[in-house]
């Protein structure tokens, strides 16, 4: 459903917009297809139609066309499935601006994802030169591995290897068996492959039917063996075809020496001056006391990311005399947005917030903040901690999933940040206290910034791991 810069809601978009660039550079020709959303970027593009047909969705005939974007230089060919009535809306999962982002999604996601997946497969069936592998991302495309194996209509693709990547196992896309008439005709004996807990569960079906599944960090794969919203037995029984491959980041897009979205670029030498100038720019926008370290949170204001732990942690930290100020950038759960808006008045000078999705401001925050707080409940990989490192902002993370894999604690060799184990206000506040101690020692802080800015989070090695897997499958 996502591919930066065409359509992005979270890290899924970053990954699908970057991995193909590095696959192509390594000689593994990779194209991307997403739905044709009504996003600004997609509305401004030019297209060439490559295929058109219709889908039977229950009693409805849905027309679609596959189009190639012809005026973008992304590093990979980008195709879109133009499905009028289903995807030509401003948002990806819900309208932007509505309480939607986090709460009220578009109500017809079952129909939308079913249409998209079938449109893609009908096109692939028709292709003269077929891809060697279909790599699907998250539950929205979780029925593809099932369909190629068990729908007579797609029988010509049944030997095509499918890879399925779990970016976020917390969402499984399950829907009621009452919707079965919306699915394309499939072999009756395959019914059980769709089922999990008496629902049609795309995530479960994907894990059962794909040739190989991956998680976006090795640590997260370990975790879902024990905790996967009820899917643990399935994960464990299919473990022989699982791999954990850590995400990289696009180090050209996220480069403080060339980034056009930040006020002052890093000259490659003077880290302190680069940080200070960018921090001053932040002080124009956010009302916080200048000499205090800025601890920032950037991301979706949802439970999964631990956003609900932040208010009490801030009150606890400030109440116990910890000297720091806090800045939040993001949208999400309506209640949380109200809480943060209220805190702005309660904690003048110590707290400020921008309740919006703003890519440029995010870049400026990475450049100008001192610490990035990521108290995630679950974090399959997490990219923000890597962006932060690259911009010299020290991550404060909960030890989970990809955060644990990428950010060793400063108490360990090669430490990159401050970690805490338990999802509690006390532990998070203690981590912030430790951060302020580091901040107060200029020499330690400088050394740490230098080290994290040099850390290698590039895509090359991760793309290599995917390519190795693709080669084994073909
Ligand atoms: C999801 C996960 C996040 C991961 C991203 C990209 O958004 O929640 O941890 O980094 O996907 O794989």
Image (cartoon, rainbow, N blue to C red):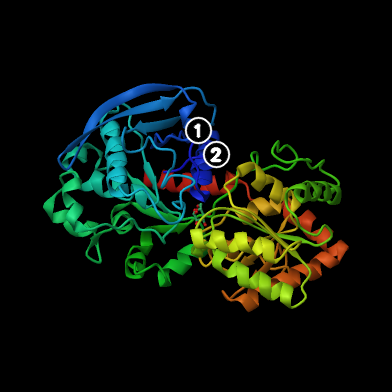
Residue 411 in view of the camera: no
Q: Is residue 84 left or right of residue 38?
A: left
Residue 407 in view of the camera: yes
Q: Position of residue 365 (x, y in %)?
A: 70, 50
**Number of the front mark, 2 or 1:** 1
Q: Secondary structure at mark 2?
A: helix
| Some atom of ligand 1 lies within 8 Å of the CB belonging to the residue at label 2 | no
Q: Is residue 384 left or right of residue 164?
A: right
Q: Which of the 4 image quadrants contains residue 95? A: top left
Q: Residue farthest to the left?
A: 188
Q: Position of residue 138 (x, y in %)?
A: 40, 51
Q: Is residue 248 left or right of residue 92?
A: right
The quadrant in which the C terminus is found is: top left
Seen at 75% across and 72% down, the residue is 434
Q: Secondary structure at mark 1?
A: helix
Q: Position of residue 199 (x, y in %)?
A: 24, 61
Q: Which residue is mark 2?
A: 22
Q: Nearer the viewer, residue 370 or 223?
A: 370
Q: Nearer the viewer, residue 37 or 213?
A: 37
Residue 44, compared with residue 151, is above or below; it is above
């Amino acid at each position: 459903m996502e591919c930066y810069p065409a359509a992005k809601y979270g890290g899924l978009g970053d990954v699908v917009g970057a991995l193909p660039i590095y696959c192509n550079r390594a000689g593994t020709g990779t194209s991307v297809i997403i739905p044709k959303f009504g996003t600004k970027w997609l509305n401004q593009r030019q297209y060439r139609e490559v295929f058109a047909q219709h889908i039977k969705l229950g009693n409805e005939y849905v027309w679609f066309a596959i189009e190639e974007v012809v005026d973008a230089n992304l590093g990979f060919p980008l195709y879109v499935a133009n499905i009028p009535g289903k995807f030509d809306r401003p948002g990806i999962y819900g309208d932007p601006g509505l309480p939607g982002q986090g709460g009220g999604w578009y109500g017809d996601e079952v129909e939308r994802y079913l249409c998209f997946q079938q449109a893609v497969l009908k096109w692939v069936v028709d292709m003269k030169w077929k891809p060697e592998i279909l790599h699907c991302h998250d539950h929205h495309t979780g029925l593809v591995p099932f369909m190629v194996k068990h729908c007579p209509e797609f029988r010509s693709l049944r030997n095509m290897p499918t890879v399925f990547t779990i970016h976020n196992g917390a969402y499984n896309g399950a829907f009621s068996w009452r919707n079965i008439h919306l699915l394309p005709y499939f072999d009756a004996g395959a019914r059980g492959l769709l089922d999990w807990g008496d629902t049609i569960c795309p995530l479960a079906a994907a894990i059962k039917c794909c040739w190989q599944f991956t998680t976006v960090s090795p640590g997260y794969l370990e975790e879902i063996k024990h905790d996967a919203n009820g899917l643990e037995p399935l994960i464990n029984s299919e473990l022989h075809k699982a791999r954990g491959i850590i995400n990289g980041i696009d180090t050209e897009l996220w480069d403080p020496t060339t980034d056009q979205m930040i006020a002052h670029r890093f000259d490659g030498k003077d880290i302190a001056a680069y940080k200070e100038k960018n921090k001053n720019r932040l002080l124009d926008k956010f009302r916080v006391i200048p000499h205090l370290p800025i601890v920032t949170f950037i991301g979706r204001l949802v439970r999964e990311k631990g956003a609900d732990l932040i208010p009490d942690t801030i009150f606890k930290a400030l109440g116990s005399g910890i000297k720091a100020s806090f800045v939040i950038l993001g949208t999400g759960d309506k209640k949380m947005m109200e809480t943060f808006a209220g805190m702005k008045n309660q904690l003048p000078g110590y707290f400020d917030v921008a309740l919006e999705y703003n890519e440029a401001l995010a870049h400026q925050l990475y450049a100008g903040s001192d610490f990035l707080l990521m108290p995630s409940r679950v974090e399959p990989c997490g990219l923000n901690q890597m962006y932060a490192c690259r911009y010299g902002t020290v991550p404060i993370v909960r030890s989970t999933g990809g955060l644990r894999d990428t950010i060793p604690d400063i108490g360990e060799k090669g430490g990159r940040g401050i970690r805490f184990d338990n999802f509690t206000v006390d532990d998070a506040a203690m981590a912030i206290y430790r951060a302020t101690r580091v901040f107060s020692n200029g020499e330690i802080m400088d050394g740490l910034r230098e080290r994290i800015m040099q850390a290698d989070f590039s895509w090359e090695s991760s793309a290599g791991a995917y390519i190795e897997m693709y080669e084994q499958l073909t």
